[in-house]
Image: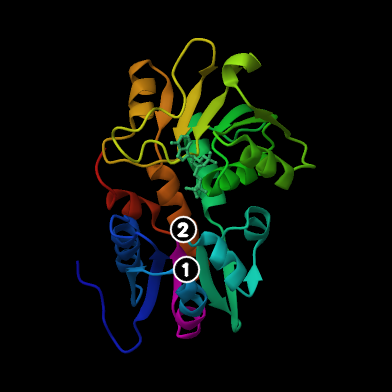
Amino acid sequence: MTLSRTSGTRLVALLGDPVRHSLSPTFQNAAFHAAELDAIYVALRCDAADVPGLIAGLARAGGAGNVTVPHKRVAARAVERATAAVERTGACNTFWLESGVVCGDNTDVVGFGRAVEDLLGGPPRGARVLLIGAGGAAGAALCSLLDEQAEEVLILNRTHAKARALAERFAGSTTRIHIAEDLEASDAGNFDLAVNATSLGLRPDDPLPMEIDARVTADAVLDMVYSPRRTRWVREHLARGTRASDGLEMLLHQGAAAFERWWGIPAPIPVMRAALPPR
Ligand code: ATR
């Protein structure tokens, strides 16, 4: 692929630790090329202490960027103008400059929403959702589920105090949010959607986020973890005939939304999808 390199080339950077295996440079550079933008996307491993300076420096030098684990919270505090998604989740994954102001958004929220819509064939309005996990990924998922007016979200997390804190952060919406301390004991029944928002599945020998048994069932399963062969949780659900997808679509859609913040034009989603590993 030939990308233009001129004195006007704009630098877009992913800030995180680690960043070595990120797919963002691959599909963003493909998108920049297709849209004929004089810009290049690079991944920069960096420490938390350097994130505020990098965000301000890149944005003010005509660039922009993304932020990934573990720096999204630091980034949320570093931007000068935050979207509602950043305020509500306390996390920022996209930054750019607008009228001299360093702006930040959390496009994981819209990325999650589009991945859910693809999976269910429509938004999760009125859905009963099991959300496993209570960290940053779970916060983005919950924010989107509330926006889409899911009827009920049951949060299940290894550390109950973190599940409670997440529910409290989003209290006051029309969606009913509950905490499950023990799914077996809670008689939870059937869900329209189950979401893995833990980091389980990143390593091949990880246990499943939730055992697949008859007491708790889901019509569809979304794993926010991405793995080249799909996660075991997704593979096992697919083998049982349950609709399931992993974090690749969410990654694509958060990237497409970031592209639109930076450039103000629609993202070439088919080009970006074609640049992802084949399934
Ligand atoms: P992220 O930003 O990717 O969501 P995070 O904020 O560190 O990362 O959250 C990680 C999530 O995975 C948490 O819900 C965590 O559970 P705890 O709150 O109990 O730490 C969950 N998680 C990580 N390792 C886990 C494991 N071995 N078993 C169960 N849950 C795990």
Give residue 131's mark.
none
Residue located at (33% from left, 26% from top): 235
Residue type marked 2: Pro
For this orientation, the residue located farthest to the left is 1
Label 2, on which residue?
70
- The residues bearing labels 1 and 2 have C-alpha atoms spaced at a distance of 8 Å
Picture residue at 27% right of the left edge, 53% below the top: 275
The verdict on label 2 being within 8 Å of ligand 1 is yes
Name the side, left or right, on which 94 lies relative to 10: right
Amino acid type of the residue tagged 1 in the rendering: Ala
Query: Which of the 4 quarters of the picture holds residue 202?
Result: top left
Residue farthest along the right direction in this orientation: 172
**Residue located at (71% from left, 47% from top):** 169
Find residue 83 and report its horizontal and vertical position in percent. Answer: 65, 63
In the displayed image of the protein, which residue is found farthest to the top? 214
Whether residue 143 can be seen here:
yes
- The answer to whether the residue labelled 1 contacts the one labelled 2, judged by CB atoms less than 8 Å apart, is yes
Which numbered dot is residue 48?
1
- 59 within the magenta span: yes
Say which of 274 and 232 sits in front. Answer: 232
x, y percentage for residue 125? Answer: 66, 33
Above or below — where is 232 with respect to 167? Answer: above
Q: Is residue 264 visible?
A: no
Q: Is residue 196 left or right of residue 172?
A: left
- Image: magenta residue range: 56-69
